[in-house]
Image (cartoon, rainbow, N blue to C red):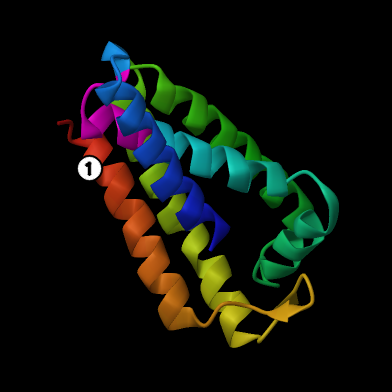
C-alpha cells in the first residue's frame, strides 16, 4: 500500500506545486512523473536495506538463479528509472522501461502469493489486490511514456 500512497501523494503534491507557480510541474503529466519517481525510489530502497530485502529475495521464484543478485539488479534499475522520470528528455523512455520492468517482475508477485509467503510478519497481499495495484502502476508508466 505504501507504493500506491507514494504515487498518489507525490503526484498530488507535485501538481499543487505546479498550481502554486512551479512551471516545471504545471500539469498532471509532470506531476505524475514525480509521483511515479517517488514510488520507485521508495520501492528501490527496499531492495537494499533491512528485512524488506530478505523478503524480496524470498519472493523470487525458486527456479530462478541468484535471487539476491536479481533483487539488487531490479533495485538499481528502479533507481535509474526514477531518475530518468525526473529528466524531461528521458522521461518517456524511462517510463516505458519501468513498465516493462514491472511486467517482468510480476511473476515474483504471483509466486509469492501462490507460495503464501509471509513478508514482514504478514501474509503477502492477495494476488487479486496485487494485480489491481500493478495495473495502476503500469498504467501510470504507460501514460507517461505516451506523453501528455
34 or 15, which is in the foreground? 15
Q: Is residue 43 left or right of residue 25?
A: right
Location of residue 25 with respect to 61 vertically, above or below: above
Q: Is residue 71 left or right of residue 10?
A: right
Q: Quadrant of residue 17?
A: top left
Residue plotted at (51% across, 68% down): 107
| Residue 105 makes an appearance in the image | yes
45 or 28, which is in the foreground? 28
Q: Quadrant of the C terminus?
A: top left
Q: Which residue is mark 1?
A: 143
Residue plotted at (67% across, 64% down): 64
Q: Secondary structure at mark 1?
A: helix
127 or 38, which is in the foreground? 38
Residue 45 image point, x, y percent: 69, 42
Say few, some or many: other residues with alpha carbon within 10 Å of mark 1 (under 14 / 14 to 19 / 20 or more): some
The question of residue 29 being in magenta is answered with yes
Q: Is residue 26 left or right of residue 14?
A: left
Predominant secondary structure, magenta span: helix
Span highlighted in magenta in the image: 25-33
Q: Is residue 91 left or right of residue 3?
A: left
Amino acid at each position: 500500500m505504501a507504493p500506491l500512497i507514494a504515487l498518489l501523494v507525490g503526484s498530488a503534491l507535485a501538481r499543487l506545486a505546479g498550481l502554486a507557480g512551479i512551471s516545471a510541474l504545471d500539469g498532471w503529466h509532470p506531476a505524475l512523473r514525480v509521483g511515479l519517481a517517488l514510488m520507485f525510489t521508495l520501492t528501490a530502497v527496499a531492495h537494499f536495506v533491512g528485512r524488506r530485502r530478505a523478503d524480496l529475495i524470498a519472493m523470487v521464484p525458486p527456479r530462478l538463479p541468484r535471487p539476491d543478485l536479481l533483487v539488487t539488479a531490479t533495485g538499481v534499475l528502479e533507481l535509474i528509472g526514477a531518475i530518468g522520470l525526473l529528466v524531461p528528455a528521458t522521461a518517456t523512455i524511462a517510463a516505458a522501461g519501468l513498465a516493462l520492468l514491472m511486467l517482468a517482475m510480476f511473476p515474483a508477485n504471483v509466486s509469492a502469493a501462490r507460495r503464501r509467503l509471509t513478508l514482514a510478519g504478514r501474509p503477502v497481499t492477495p494476488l487479486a489486490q496485487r494485480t489491481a495495484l500493478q495495473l495502476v502502476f503500469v498504467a501510470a508508466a504507460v501514460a507517461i511514456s505516451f506523453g501528455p
